[in-house]
Image: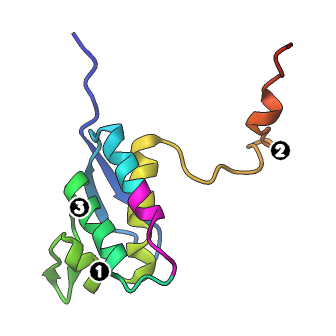
């Protein structure tokens, strides 16, 4: 008997988007996660929208999302074009990071304090120099 991989993650949101559920593939190879992360990081601040649209198309292709979004009582197609044309910007910009966090279990950036209120040590402080 083997370990069954989680096939799907469900993204949920806080107000004003509570009730929205997006079901996405969780069985995505690391290479594709890095590809998506790189593509998102390469979109310039002065992007005319085309870079963001390419990232959304890549995200849709990779994670194959399905959602319960409606507009005026009609289902919104779960496509890159609909994300760019119909979703509020603050929601559209949350999609890739929310999926990445759900799949990897790591949110970025890491908090600067631990749950007990103390500082989170940096990796540099955790490592000790090797003798030469």
Whole-angstrom CA distance, mark 1 to mark 3, is 12 Å
Q: Are marks 1 and 3 in contact (CB under 8 Å)?
A: no
Whole-angstrom CA distance, mark 2 to mark 3, is 37 Å
In the rendering, at what x and y percent does residue 49 appear? 36, 83
Q: Earlier in the sequence, mark 1 or mark 3?
A: 3
- Neighbor class of circle 1 (other Cα within 10 Å; few <14, some 14-19, many 20+) is some
State which quadrant residue 121 falls in.
top right
Q: Which residue is mark 2?
A: 119
State which quadrant residue 29 falls in.
top left
- Residue 3, which numbered label? none
Please tell me which residue is depicted at 38% across the width and 74% down the height of the picture. Answer: 92
Q: Which residue is mark 3?
A: 60
Q: Which residue is mark 1?
A: 84
State which quadrant residue 83 falls in.
bottom left
Q: Earlier in the sequence, mark 2 or mark 1?
A: 1
The quadrant of the image that shows the C terminus is top right
Is 65 located above or below residue 90 in the figure? above
The quadrant of the image that shows the N terminus is top left
The magenta stretch spans residue 75: no
Query: Which residues are drawn in magenta?
Result: 38-45
């Amino acid at each position: 008997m083997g370990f069954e991989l989680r096939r799907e993650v469900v993204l949920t949101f806080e107000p004003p988007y509570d009730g929205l559920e997006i079901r996405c593939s969780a069985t995505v190879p690391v290479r594709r996660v890095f590809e998506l992360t790189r593509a998102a990081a390469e979109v310039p601040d002065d992007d005319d929208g085309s870079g963001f649209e390419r990232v959304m198309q890549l995200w849709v292709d990779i994670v194959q999302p399905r959602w319960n979004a409606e507009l005026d009582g009609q289902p919104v197609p779960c496509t890159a074009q609909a994300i760019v044309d119909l979703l509020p910007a603050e929601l559209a910009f949350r999609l890739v990071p929310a999926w990445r966090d759900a799949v990897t279990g790591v949110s970025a950036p890491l908090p600067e304090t631990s749950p007990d209120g103390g500082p989170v040590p940096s990796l540099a402080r955790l490592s000790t120099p090797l003798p030469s």
